[in-house]
Structure formats: structure tokens, C-alpha cells
Image: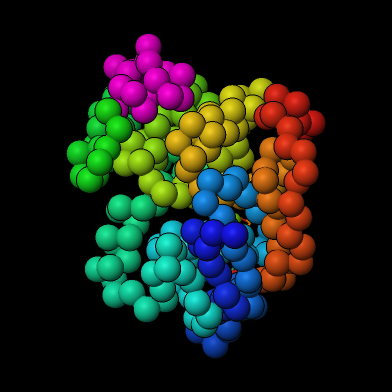
């Protein structure tokens, strides 16, 4: 089998606030294969966001190794991490983080401009089904549409990996399905390796692989023999 795109080995993370030390991750092992769509489940505080942020180069592990395409992120300088994020990682967060004073097209173009081999912003917006909303400002778009702009922005640099932290967390189920359909389409058409954190256990059925967190560890990793389409999932 080909080497995984991401290899996480015995990763730990502790946060110290004053005298209190919290172990957010207590030894996580995970492999994310190229082209795979993974779902990360688990109770609040179990370490999901901490791991995603470390994988995306936004935070650093306290121990262990994180390899992306053979590159050891734990050994990278800040400069190298910034470059890794810029070139390889697309982020999607719960609350879109669009720039309110820029149109949908401009929000996407901002990222496309600094990318090495970008998608045309219009093409990225077409991919998420918002071709006819390019000149709209975020305030003129629904939550689900704003999230789709955020996905267009994340994919505009053709990232090797898309890391999504509760992308449907602020949406109703019908809108959430549309967002998941877009993520699935990106995964299938571009082969973008994708990790999705969610509190909605139903979403596990759309993934190739499901990782369940508990107390800073992965308790279970399950491969789905049959994947459902987002519209077939029970929320
Ligand atoms: N910057 C930080 N400083 C101190 N403690 C933190 C920090 N970030 C996370 N933690 C702690 O680490 C643990 C794991 O947090 P994390 O955000 O990874 O959980 P999560 O699984 O994403 O939870 P949720 O589902 O609520 O988003 C929690 O106990 C949290 O309080
Ligand atoms: Mg979280």
C-alpha cells in the first residue's frame, strides 16, 4: 500500500495555564491516506480540534511525530510551517471567517493570489454551486452559502489536504447536507484528502474511515465498507 499522506505517531499535547497542566492529546496514532475522506468524532474536550490544528501546522505537538508526505512537521521551523500551511492545507471552520467587506469572488481571489497553482476563483465558486453569487457580500448570503464560499476559498489553492472543524456545526440539517455534498464532490473530483470533525454521528457514514476520540486518544478507527451519500444520512 502507498505511504499515507499523513502519519501521526504517538502525538501528545499539553497546555499549561498557570499551575494547571491539561493533556489534550495523550498519544494519538493515525494514518490518513491519499484521497481519503475521514471523519473525526468524539465528546467535547476529547482533543479533536487540537489534533486537527497540529496536523494543519497551526499548533505544535508536545511529543510524537507528524509526517506530511514524508516531511516531519514537528521538526519544522515557524517559517517552514507557514509555508506548509500556505502550500498544502485548506481550512474550513464552523464560523466561515469570511471578510465581510469583500464579495464572494474577492474572498476566494485573496487566497488564489498567493497560491502557486491556484484554481480560478470563478471555477472554485462554480465547484461549490455558487457561480451566480460571485458578486454577493457575505451578509447577502445564507449561512450554508457562506460556508460554501469558505470551502471555495479553501480549495482555491488546490490543497493536498482539507481540514474541516465542525463545518456543519452552525447549520440546519438540510443546509448541512449541501455543505457535505460539496466536500464530497471536492474529495471525488480533485482527490483532496479530507478530514472532517463533527458532533453529528450520522455523518460518519459518508467517510472512508472514522476515528473516534476519547480523553485525548483515538479509541476506535473503523473503515466503512459502504459509504452513504450525504442526503442518505440520518441526522
Ligand atoms: N489553547 C488551549 N489552552 C489550554 N487548554 C486547551 C487549549 N486548547 C484546548 N485545550 C484543552 O484541551 C482539551 C481538548 O480540547 P479540544 O479543543 O481539542 O477538544 P475538542 O474535541 O475539539 O472539543 P469540542 O468538540 O468541544 O470542540 C480540552 O480540555 C481543552 O480545554
Ligand atoms: Mg473542537
Identity of the residue furthest to the front in this view: 1
Q: Residue 17, how many percent across, how many down? A: 51, 79
Dominant secondary structure of the magenta stretch?
helix
User: Would you say 201 lies left or right of 190 here?
Assistant: right
On the question of residue 49 being in view, the answer is no
Which quadrant of the view contains residue 221? bottom right
Residue plotted at (67% across, 46% down): 208
Residue plotted at (48% across, 66% down): 54
Q: Is residue 138 magenta?
A: yes
Which quadrant of the view contains residue 51? bottom right
Q: Residue 142, how many percent across, how many down? A: 49, 22
In the depicted structure, whether residue 130 falls above or below residue 168: above
Quadrant where the image shows the N terminus: bottom right
**Magenta-drawn segment:** 121-141
User: Would you say 130 lies left or right of 42 here?
Assistant: left
On the question of residue 210 being in view, the answer is yes
Residue plotted at (29% across, 27% down): 121
Q: Residue 92, how many percent across, how many down? A: 47, 43
In the depicted structure, whether residue 209 falls above or below residue 167: below
Q: Residue 96, how many percent across, how many down? A: 45, 38
Identity of the residue furthest to the left in this view: 113
User: Would you say 200 lies left or right of 129 here?
Assistant: right
Amino acid at each position: 500500500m502507498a505511504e499515507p499522506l499523513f502519519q501521526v505517531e504517538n502525538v501528545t499535547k499539553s497546555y499549561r495555564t498557570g499551575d494547571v497542566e491539561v493533556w489534550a492529546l495523550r498519544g494519538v496514532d493515525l494514518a490518513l491516506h491519499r484521497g481519503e475522506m475521514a471523519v473525526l468524532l468524539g465528546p467535547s474536550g476529547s482533543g479533536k480540534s487540537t489534533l486537527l490544528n497540529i496536523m494543519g501546522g497551526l499548533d505544535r505537538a508536545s511529543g510524537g511525530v507528524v509526517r506530511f508526505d514524508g516531511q516531519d512537521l514537528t521538526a519544522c521551523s515557524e517559517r517552514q510551517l507557514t509555508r506548509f500551511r500556505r502550500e498544502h492545507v485548506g481550512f474550513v471552520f464552523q464560523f466561515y471567517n469570511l471578510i465581510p467587506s469583500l464579495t464572494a469572488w474577492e474572498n476566494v481571489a485573496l487566497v488564489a493570489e498567493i497560491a502557486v497553482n491556484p484554481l480560478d476563483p470563478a471555477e472554485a465558486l462554480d465547484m461549490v454551486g455558487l457561480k451566480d453569487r460571485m458578486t454577493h457580500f457575505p451578509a447577502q448570503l445564507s449561512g450554508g452559502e457562506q460556508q460554501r464560499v469558505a470551502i471555495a476559498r479553501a480549495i482555491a489553492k488546490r490543497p493536498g489536504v482539507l481540514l474541516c472543524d465542525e463545518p456543519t456545526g452552525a447549520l440546519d440539517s438540510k443546509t448541512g447536507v449541501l455543505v457535505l455534498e460539496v466536500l464530497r464532490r471536492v474529495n471525488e473530483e480533485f482527490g483532496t484528502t479530507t478530514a472532517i470533525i463533527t458532533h453529528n454521528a450520522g455523518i460518519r457514514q459518508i467517510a472512508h474511515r472514522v476515528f473516534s476520540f476519547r480523553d485525548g486518544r483515538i479509541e476506535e478507527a473503523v473503515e466503512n465498507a459502504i459509504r452513504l451519500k450525504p442526503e442518505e444520512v440520518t441526522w
